[in-house]
Amino acid sequence: MLDSSIEDVVFSYCKNGEFSDTKKTISVHRPWCDAAEILEMFGKDHGIMVDRIQEMQREDIDYEVLCVGYALEASGSHVRKPYSRACEYSGHKLVSFLAERPWKSNPWSAGDQIDALGTAFYHNRKFFDIPFDQDTLFSTLDSMCDPDSGLWGEGDLHLRVNGFYRLTRGTYSQFGRPLPYPEKAVDSILRHSGNDEYFAYPHGTACDVLDVIHPLWLCRKQTDHRYEEAVTGLWDGSGG
């Protein structure tokens, strides 16, 4: 794709004044946010889109906290107001929120919900100087992490690794906090990465790859454990 065609390609997805997503993602506003970020990446003028994306901000603490907030931040702007609902989560209410996530049935969903709340905390603190209860957030998450696997939740390893990415991306990574068991996490992530169901051609998706690469990058900040194996791809899939 030539740089000169970027705007034409991006705006070819704008129909009747609206960007559309044929895959129906979990965010109705994500197509606008993705378009703004792509144009920004190639240095194209998209100032008119910033006001429109700012209007998309809602009070709900969900995936759109990420796509709206980051699209605005990448464009040199930010959300117009703090996420007031995020301010309600501290102390016992925050502990209850974390404990009540679907850790057994869907650890990915649990990580997704924590990612959204952590990102709301992030925008509130960075742009509105509103603190949050970091001590409770991280002490509780630390205590909930499985010391044998370095992951959160139970059951399917695919969902646990992908949930690890979402949870740590919005909390540990975003606020520069150390992971509780990085070496064990590396073992679990590499064991999952050896699963042909998700990573052998033609299986797998960009999301599955990201959900492995970012966690390994994050763990690397704390440990060299199995680094050469991860870089070369020379491991037996046993996870150590």
Image (tube, rainbow, N blue to C red):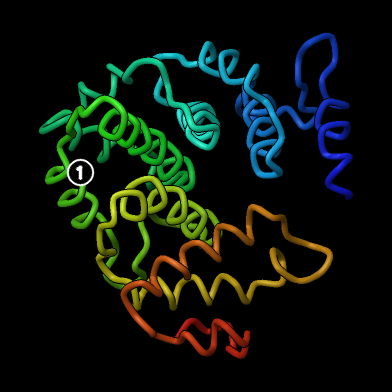
Residue at disc 1, secondary structure: helix
At 68% across and 40% down in the image, what residue appears? 43
* Residue 207, placed above or below residue 224: above
* Residue 219, placed above or below residue 71: below
Residue indicated by mark 1: 137
Relative placement, left or right, of 120 versus 232 is left
Quadrant housing residue 26: top right
Q: Residue 173 location in percent, x, y?
A: 36, 55
Q: Nearer the viewer, residue 99 or 80?
A: 80
Relative placement, left or right, of 110 versus 159 is left
Q: Residue 42 location in percent, x, y?
A: 71, 44
At 31% across and 19% down in the image, what residue appears? 82
At label 1, the amino acid type is Leu
Relative placement, left or right, of 135 versus 61 is left
Q: Residue 182 location in percent, x, y?
A: 33, 72
Q: Nearer the viewer, residue 135 or 7?
A: 7
Using a 10 Å C-alpha cutoff, classify the residue at mark 1 as few (fewer than 14 neighbours), some (14 to 19) or many (20 or more): some
Q: Nearer the viewer, residue 89 or 95?
A: 89
At 33% across and 20% down in the image, what residue appears? 83
Quadrant housing residue 131: top left
At 28% across and 70% down in the image, what residue appears? 181
* Residue 119, placed above or below residue 227: above
Q: Quadrant of the C terminus?
A: bottom left
* Residue 235, placed above or below residue 211: below
